Image (cartoon, grey):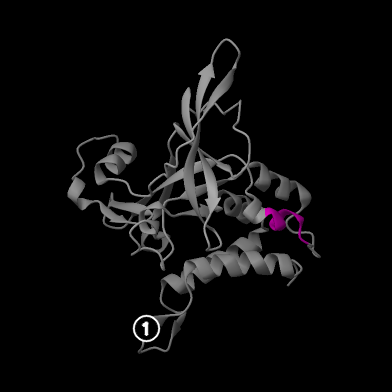
Amino acid sequence: MLPLVGDIDVMSHRSTELAIPQGHPPPTQLPDEFHNNVKVHEIVDSYLPGYVYLKLRYLLSECIEEEKYNYFKCDNWLYLSNRFQKEDAESRLFGGTGYDIERLTVEAPSVSRHLTPLLPVDYVRCVRCLSWPPQAADWSTRQRNYGWPDSATVGHVVSNGCDVVGVAHRQCRQHEWMGKNQWRLSFSRAEIVLINSWMPVQQIVYHMLRFFMKTNRLIHGYYSRRVIVSKYHIKTLVLWTSEQKPRSW
């Protein structure tokens, strides 16, 4: 079954970095996973939906006596780069345990490492955002005629916030500044919650569609071998259909 698994995706955020929506005040309380000194980057919209910039806005310092974080405002215009080095990826993903660094493949927004011939690991650097972003505000309030996801699931998704991954839009990757400073909002946490809320038959349909795609059955013609449906398309279509159609469908 391993050839059909594809790969393992590992999203990892630093405990010293945090993102907040533009205009939001800095947090005074953070989960235990965060360091006692944290850089807070403000999410700034780009002209492309879903793509943003991260501008350093605050420095947080934990005050043990008061059990909260104090903040210091940064007035500079320092933007967080989406670039990272192979050395950084190897150290954080593999603990510096002697893996051959030249076998790491860097392709934004991930670093790939083949732990076995059949099971590669894609490491993705992200910045954690504890708040649900205003760019996706309509998702939690839109009309749902068939009760999925229910209000409890929507509340769970929104309370999880989102992440920001370091990748520029394909139209901007060759641009000198945007190519290295543009980020993309990621809702992987939300998708996991939603997929786990499906009935078993819905999950089976989803995985069978992925199986057909992985085995080259969803292509345009037998000889052209041009892929017309990707994993991203399948996931998005099934999530959307689950809202638009009753479960019996």
Image x and y of residue 160, in percent: 62, 42
Image x and y of residue 203, in percent: 60, 61
In this view, the residue in front, 152 or 179, is 179
Residue 202 covered by magenta stretch: no
Q: Residue at x 40, y 58 (%)?
A: 178
In this view, the residue in front, 70 or 164, is 70
- Mark 1 sits on what residue? 225
Per the image, label 1 sits on a secondary structure element best described as loop
Is residue 116 left or right of 228 when viewed as pictured?
left
State which quarter of the image contains the N terminus. Answer: bottom left
Which segment is the magenta one? 137-142
Q: Is residue 219 above or below residue 121?
A: below
Q: Main secondary structure of the magenta part?
A: helix
Q: Residue at x 64, y 59 (%)?
A: 200
Residue type indicated by callout 1: Arg
Q: Is residue 208 visible?
A: no
